Image (tube, coloured by chain):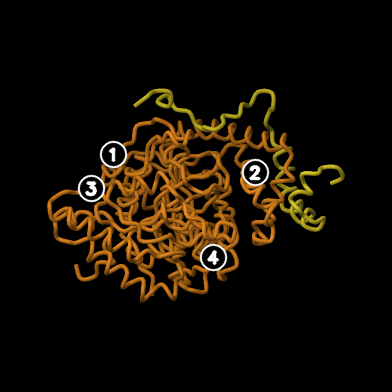
Chain colours: A yellow, B orange
Amino acid sequence: MGEVNWLEKVVVSDEALADAWELIKGHLEGVEEADVDPWVEPVLYPNLIKTPEAGKDV
Amino acid sequence: MSDLTELTVTAAADLIARKKLSPVELVRALLDRIERVEPKVLAWARLLPEAALDEARRLESLQVRGELCGPLHGIPVGLKDIIFTAGVETAAGSKVLAGFVPEYDATVTARLKAAGAIILGKTVTTEFAMFEPGPTRNPWNPEHTPGGSSSGSAAAVAARMCPAAFGSQTAGSILRPASFCGIVGLKPTYGRVSRHGVVPVSWTLDHVGPMTRTVADAALLLKVVAGPDPNDPTTLPVPVDDYPAAVGQDAAGLRVGIPDRFFTELADDESRRAYEAAITRLKELGLMPRPVRLPDVFEPLRDAHRTVMYAEAATFHKKWFAERPDDYRPRTRRIIQAGILTPAPIYLRAQQIRTRAVRAMLRLFEEVDVLVTPTTTGPAPRGLDWTGDPAFNQPFSAVGFPAITVPAGLSSSGLPLGVQFVARPFDERTLIRVAAAFEAASGLALKPPI
C-alpha cells in the first residue's frame, strides 16, 4: 500500500489486507459494472426516500 | 390466565388497563420463566430484575389509582444491546464497548418508557450487530442458530421470556432471526423510527424495529416508537398512522406482487412450498397475487449494499480499530478492513445504485400494494458459527422500504419458516393489514418445545 500512511495507522498486516480484499473485491466489481449513469443519478443522502409529506411540518 | 408468559403485549396491556393483572405479577412470571429457560437459550446480555421489579411496583401503584402512562403500561420488553439505556451497560456484544454505560436513553428506549414499558434487560447481539455470533441458541433446537444480529431479541420473545423486544436491521437482522425463531419481526421504512442512541453499523442502512409474537403487537409497538426525532435528522415528519387499527381490516382486493426471479431460485424446497402455500392462502383471502418483474438494478443492489455497509462500518470504527485491533473478532475486523479498502468513487456509485433502485421499486409499487417473498432461503441452519443468509431481506434494507415477517409453518426438521411482505415507503399500515390477515387465516400458534 506504499505511501498510504493512514492504512498503517489501522495496523493491518499485508495478509489481513489481502483477506479483506477477497471479501470486498467482488462487490466493488459488481458496483463498477452496474448499469448506472454517474452523470445523472443523484445520491439522496441522508434521506433515501422523500415523500410529499416529508417537507411539511406535522 | 394460567400462564402469564403466554400473554401477548396487546392482551397483557388490556388486562393491566382493566386492573385484572398487575405489572408486578407479570414481571415475576417472566423472571421465573427466564430462570428456567435462559440457561438453555442464552438470549440475555444483561438482565435487570431488580430495576424491572422496582419499575413494575411504581407502575402498579399508578395502575391502582387509575393512572396509566400509556399503551404499554406495565409491559416488559427486551432491548438489543446496541440500544442505549441510561445508566445500564450497552456493550454491543463487543470487547471494545464492554463497560460502556450511556448517560442517556436512545429515543426508542425513552419512547417505550414514556408509554409505560418496563426494560427487562438487554438482549444478545452479534459483535457490533455484524457477523460474529453471540452465544444465543435457537429455542426450537439448540443446535441451530437463532439468526442474527438481533439474536437474543428473537430467541427471548420466542421462548416466552418477554412478550416483545427491539432489534435492528442493516441487512436482515430483524426479519431473519424472527423467521428462524417463529415470531413476527417488522423493519420500518428508513426514516420512520429514530436511531438516536443506537450503536450504528451503517448509518444509511440501519433500521430499528419491533419483534413480537403477533402482528398486532408489532403494530402497537411501532406506533409508540415511530415519528420524527430532532436528534436523528434522517427521520421524516410523516404522520404516524394508527397501525393497530389496520389489524383485522379486510385485505381483499389488495394487489400482491410475486417477484419473477431471485427468491424462488435461491429458496430451498421447503421454503418454496411454504411460500406457495402462503400465496394460495392470500388468494383465498381475496387478495390478488400477480407476477411482477423485479427491476434490473435488483442484482447489483446486493453489491451496492455490501459496499456501503462495509465502508460506513469502517468509518464508524476506524479510530477504535486503530487503537485496539485485537479487541475485534475476525469477521468484524475483516469487514472494517474491507471498508477501509473501498475507494470513495465506488462507495458513491453504490449509493447511486441504491437511488436508482429506490426509484425502480417505487415504479414497481404502482402495480401492486405489497410484495410477498419467502423471508429466508430456508430454516435456521445447523451450527452456531454463523447466523444465516440475509439475501432475501437485504434488498429491502438497501432501498429502505418497510418489511415484515410472519410465521408460515414448520419445516420437516421442526424449525420455523416465514413469509415476508414488503410495502411502499411509509405504508406500514398496508403492510400490517396484509400481514395480520395472513396471520389470522394461517391460524398458526407456534411455540418452541423448550
- Label 1, label 3: how many angstroms apart (C-alpha)? 18 Å
Q: Mark 1 points at which residue?
A: B242
Residue mark closest to the camera, 1 vs 2? 2
Q: Name the residue under label 2.
A: B315
Q: Based on the displayed image, in which of its 4 quarters is residue B192 positioned?
A: top left
Q: Are marks 2 and 4 in contact (CB under 8 Å)?
A: no
Marks 1/2: CA–CA distance: 37 Å
Give residue B141's position: percent from left, percent from top: 47, 73
Note whether B122 is above or below B287 in the view shown. below
Q: Which amino acid, mark 4?
A: Gly
Q: Mark 1 lies on which chain?
A: B
Image depth: mark 2 or mark 4 in front: 2
Marks 3 and 4, how far apart at CA: 35 Å
Badge 2 marks a residue whose secondary structure is helix
- What type is the residue that disc 3 sits on? Cys
Classify B16 as above or below B423. below
Point out which mark residue B134 bears.
4
The answer to whether the residue labelled 2 contacts the one labelled 3, judged by CB atoms less than 8 Å apart, is no
Question: In which chain is the residue bearing label 2?
Answer: B
Mark 2 / mark 3, whichever is N-terminal: 3
| Mark 3 element type | loop
Task: Judge depth for marks 1 and 3 and give the one in front.
Answer: 3
Q: Gap in Å between the C-alphas at discs 2 and 4? A: 24 Å
Camera-side mark, 4 or 1: 4
The numbered disc on residue B69 is 3
Q: Are marks 2 and 3 on the same chain?
A: yes
**Element under disc 1:** loop
